[in-house]
Amino acid sequence: MCQLLIKNVKISIRFIFLFAIVSGIHFSLLAQEREVERELIVQFKSETVKLPTGLESVSLRQPLSFMSSEFQSKLRKQGAESLSKAFPEFSLSDTLKTSRTGEEVRLPNLSQIYIIKLTSDMNRKTALDSLQKMSEVLFVEPNGMAITQVVYPNDERFDNPSNPGSGGEQWNLLNTGQNSGTNDADIDAPEAWDITKGSSWAIW
């Protein structure tokens, strides 16, 4: 009887512990989602905002030397409380690359893309509509959360059905290091199929 009681107590403790972990993850994701729902992604015209080197985020509640007070006032009227770089690791040198054929290729400049956090009482749609009309803004869109899904085809040669994700014979599409191969030395087919699976139409 005593042993049965101890066993039931252990099971209850494990259940409570597991429930606490799952609940914690769930509430953490909900909190993240609520934060993202207060954010807009915006690209400014060059020279509109220039955060000093090493600074990734600023509060808009205080006067700033690297943007005009008039523009800062405009942002504040739309409920903007902070501004942060969307791509903090981006460098202007990243805009110029050399292709495999030796040509110089100019890539988009991501240094003027920022995340604006709005005050909790500000309507995001209203702020977005107002920012779109500003001459200093190139584009603005709501921020959001994405959940990635990897798509595996129903093909035994592509993946091992008894051990999904371990890879099959087609290592060039999905390489998990099977048969002493190099892990991830593949063309990332599952990630591509998550974007599009092609079409039934064919051009001959």
Image (spheres, rainbow, N blue to C red):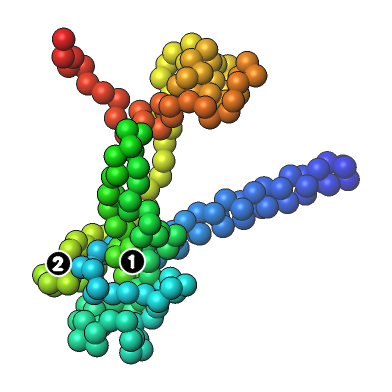
Whether residue 50 is visible, yes or no, is yes
Percent position (x, y) of residue 117?
34, 71
What crowding class fits label 1: few (fewer than 14 Cα within 10 Å), some (14-19), or many (20 or more)? many
Side of 172 where 199 appears, left or right: left
Please, what is the three-letter code of the amino acid marked with disc 2? Gln
Q: Earlier in the sequence, mark 1 or mark 2?
A: 1
Q: Residue at x 24, y 88 (%)?
A: 69
Side of 70 where 49 appears, left or right: right
Tell me where residue 81 sits by quadrant. Answer: bottom left
Please, what is the three-letter code of the amino acid marked with disc 1? Ile
Percent position (x, y) of residue 40?
28, 65
Q: Label 2, on which residue?
A: 132
Tell me the quarter of the image containing the C terminus: top left
Tell me the quarter of the image containing the N terminus: top right
Marks 1 and 2, how far apart at CA: 15 Å
Q: Label 1, on which residue?
A: 115
Q: Residue at x 41, y 19 (%)?
A: 153
Percent position (x, y) of residue 36?
37, 62
Residue extending furthest toward the front: 102
- Count of labels shown? 2
